[in-house]
Amino acid sequence: MILSKVHSKGMTHNDIKPSNFLVTSDSFLVLSDFELSKSKRRIVNTSFLSTTTVASVEGHSTAYAAPEILENQNAPDEVTWFDWLKLCDAFCLGITIFHVIL
């Protein structure tokens, strides 16, 4: 639910890991540290895409990053950049849940 809320606002987080989740005094789970986040509006800006590799490894927590991020791959032609980064966020969330359960 947290991740879908972020994505519904036109954002991707790009660094989901256990230490970026905080628990409030009311026992609500909050996602923090949006330093590497990307906005959908900025991603679709062609000047941004031509000057920047969205899948930059720099700054990502390698233990939780999607393999595509670590290999510095670009989004496939049939997927938008925003949808591709949402999938990478979902992968990171899955790894985070796996590590928390263990």
Image: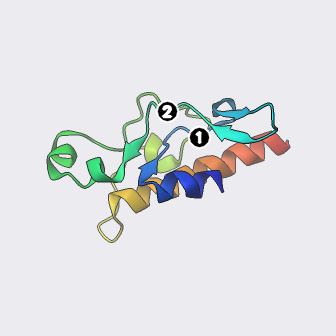
Tell me how the rendering is colored: rainbow
Q: What's the distance in space between the residues labelled 2 and 1, CA to CA?
A: 9 Å
The image's mark for residue 7 is none
Q: Which residue sits at x=55%, y=31%?
A: 61
Vertical side of 45 occupied by 83: above or below: below
Q: Which residue sits at x=50%, y=43%?
A: 13
> Residue 77 appears at what percent x and percent y?
29, 67
Q: Which one is in front in this view, the residue at disc 2 or the one at disc 1?
A: 1
State the residue position of label 2.
60
Image quadrant assignment for residue 80: bottom left
Q: Quadrant of the N terminus?
A: bottom right
Q: Quadrant of the C terminus?
A: top right
Q: Is residue 84 left or right of residue 100?
A: left
Instruction: Work out whether residue 75 or residue 81 is closer to the camera in this orientation and state it.
Output: 81
State the residue position of label 1.
16
Q: Is residue 73 left or right of residue 99?
A: left
> Residue 95 appears at what percent x and percent y?
68, 47
Instruction: Work out whether residue 45 or residue 62 is closer to the camera in this orientation and state it.
Output: 45
Image quadrant assignment for residue 76: bottom left
Q: Is residue 37 left or right of residue 21?
A: left
Instruction: Work out whether residue 35 or residue 72 is closer to the camera in this orientation and state it.
Output: 35
Image quadrant assignment for residue 64: top right
Q: Is residue 81 visible?
A: yes
Identify the secondary structure beneath mark 2: loop
Vertical side of 45 occupied by 52: above or below: above
What type is the residue that disc 1 sits on? Ile
Q: Earlier in the sequence, mark 2 or mark 1?
A: 1
Going by the picture, which residue comes out furthest to the front? 26
